[in-house]
């Protein structure tokens, strides 16, 4: 396990987010993971943060709301792109309400070091995050074209600001 400075890896991380990474959370002994491709790395309150946007309908949202922590797993250059495409396709279309996605994918879950949410060994670049701010996006503040394109069904995103409290490559 190699500790990393996320700002040294920011460009790699953001390029990976564009094609899809995994957001994982654990509550009541159960783990759930979903694909995300909206997110950003930055600084607020002098802290490094990963901000992610989760729609109301996602089962994963219930986990994060319960515990206030999550992990993000990002592939490295050593990760097989074909495997990653399969993972994102599956974890981005199936809900943890119906199946155990981590088991279905054969993931090796590794306990988080600082937060109680696991990392995924097969997708080794890990951000451990603690929610320090969350805000449901305000439909009235949305640009009309995005409102029409993304929220016809009223399934609004909540922005979760996760302080990155640990970061490493397994
Ligand atoms: C490439 C990709 C990116 C996605 N990005 C997001 C995202 O940023 N936010 C979100 O709420 N859903 C996103 N999704 C959809 C969720 O991953 C999907 O609805 C998933 O089945 C939710 O699982 P859950 O119900 O177990 O939480 C994405 C799906 C794909 C395929």
Image (tube, grey):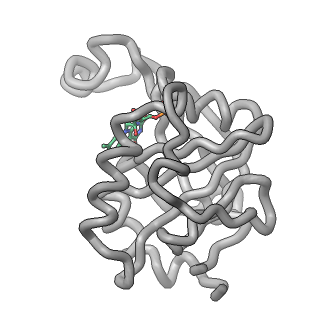
State left or right for residue 154 relative to residue 64: left
Let me know if residue 126 appears in the view: yes
State left or right for residue 63 relative to residue 140: right
Q: Residue furthest bottom?
A: 2
Q: Which quarter shows the C terminus? A: bottom right
- Give x and y (percent) for residue 11: 37, 75
State left or right for residue 152 relative to residue 127: left
Q: Which quarter shows the N terminus? A: bottom right
Question: In this orientation, which residue lies closer to the viewer: 26 or 150?
Answer: 26
Image quadrant assignment for residue 163: bottom right
- Give x and y (percent) for residue 73: 52, 63
Image quadrant assignment for residue 64: top right
State left or right for residue 67 relative to residue 5: right
In terms of image quarters, where does ligand 1 lie? top left
Q: Total marks drawn?
A: 0
Question: In this orientation, which residue lies closer to the viewer: 30 or 132?
Answer: 30
Identify the residue at image location x=48%, y=21%.
57
Question: In this orientation, which residue lies closer to the viewer: 154 or 122?
Answer: 122
Say if 26 sits above or below 10 in the image. Answer: above
Image quadrant assignment for residue 160: top right
Let me know if residue 132 appears in the view: no
């Amino acid at each position: 396990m190699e500790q990393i400075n996320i700002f040294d890896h920011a460009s790699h991380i953001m390029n990976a987010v564009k094609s899809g990474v995994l957001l994982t959370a654990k509550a009541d002994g159960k783990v759930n993971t979903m694909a995300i491709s909206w997110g950003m790395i930055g600084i607020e309150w002098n802290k490094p943060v990963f901000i992610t946007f989760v729609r109301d309908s996602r089962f994963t949202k219930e986990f994060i709301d319960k515990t206030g922590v999550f992990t993000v797993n990002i592939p490295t250059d050593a990760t097989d792109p074909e495997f990653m495409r399969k993972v994102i396709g599956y974890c981005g279309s199936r809900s943890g309400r119906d199946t155990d996605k981590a088991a279905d994918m054969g993931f090796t879950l590794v306990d988080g070091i600082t937060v109680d949410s696991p990392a995924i060994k097969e997708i080794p670049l890990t951000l451990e995050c603690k929610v320090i701010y969350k805000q449901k996006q305000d439909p009235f503040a949305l640009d009309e074209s995005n409102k029409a394109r993304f929220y016809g069904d009223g399934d609004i995103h909540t922005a979760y600001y996760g302080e990155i409290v640990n970061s490493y490559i397994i």
